[in-house]
Image (spheres, rainbow, N blue to C red):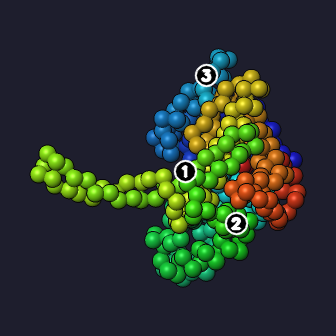
Amino acid sequence: MQQQFTGTDMLKIDIANCYGMDKQSWVDRLLWTELHEDELEDLATDADDEMLYKKAVYAHRESLLGKAIGHNMFLDATASGLQIMAALSGCKKTARHVNMVNTGKREDVYIEVGESMNKMLSPLEHVHRNIIKLPLMTHYYNKSKQPSLSETQQAAFYNILSNSFEGAEGCKYIINQFWDPTALEHTFTLPDGHVARVLVTDVATTRIEVDELDHTSFSYRFEANAPSKISTSLCPNVIHAIDGYIVREMIRRADKAGFELAHIFDAFTCHPNHMGKTTQFYREILAEIADSNLLSNILSEIAGKHIPVTKLSNDLSKDILASEYMLS
């Protein structure tokens, strides 16, 4: 059963998050704050984000005195790009790694990939979370090689992704197939009617002559709106455009519900009293994407003809709506 939290609970969770407990379960975060109630101020210098931690503790103390607080807290999406790709493809394997399927704990995809790799690597080649985060993010931006990983580590890395992230890998592959090397732009429409026009750019070179310098000339390289054979930008642009739609829809639903919601990329901030509603909105929007034909619609618009997309499951939305840690 999905846990429900009051604004007071969310404020305590915020304190624990700022201290560095954001990878723990909700219960463990609440318990941490409650166990350290009498020494919260003394622990500030040990917090991951000292300024935000002090701010949250101050708001907590004010609320205990019965005072209204204007404090806002943050919760971040746990790998929003992979969440979107899981929803588009109906992939429960990918979804499980990024908290779209309730496993009973707060999953950390970067730790999971690293630990899976380590089972395939010698101890001298073992990796940790900080090494894996950037390669995992940029892989789905179409970065083909990961210079921070050795050849052996890369082999393990790609092996894990092909077996454990089937939907995300398939999503990346199929989007890349619809790059048009003759186009000046790729255009597609999001569910709210917003039209994304993504200009194609390529590097051009021109020769410039300066009359005032005895006709000295030099070459100038610049990005121009021109057709390109380099197709790596299409997949990240599609996923980012969907991410932008999610943010817009989150703001619209919060406005309709009567509270203010702001964001920094995929980190959402609001008063603790409204954070439960915010996490609900996020689940609902991703569930709607999972139930939709959004990827087919986008590819069909780019291609100018109907492109069917077969999903790996048709009921992922049920898992999404029952999940706990998509925003965490």
Q: CA distance from mark 2 to mark 1?
A: 20 Å
Q: First in sequence: mark 2 or mark 1?
A: 2
Please tell me how crowded label 3 is: few (under 14), some (14-19), or many (20+) other residues with Cα within 10 Å: few
Q: Which mark is residue 199?
A: 1
Q: Nearer the viewer, residue 242 or 71?
A: 242
User: What's the residue type where badge 3 is placed?
Assistant: Gly
Q: Are marks 3 and 2 in contact (CB under 8 Å)?
A: no
Observer able to see residue 102: no
Residue 203 appears at what percent x and percent y? 41, 59
Q: Residue 174 bears which disc, if any?
A: 2
Can residue 115 be seen in this snapshot? yes
**What residue is disc 3 on?**
70
Residue neighbourhood size for the residue with mark 1, other residues' Cα within 10 Å, grouped as few (<14), some (14–19), many (≥20)? some
Of badges 3 and 1, the one in the foreground is 1
Snapshot quadrant of residue 38: top right
**Type of amino acid under label 1:** Leu
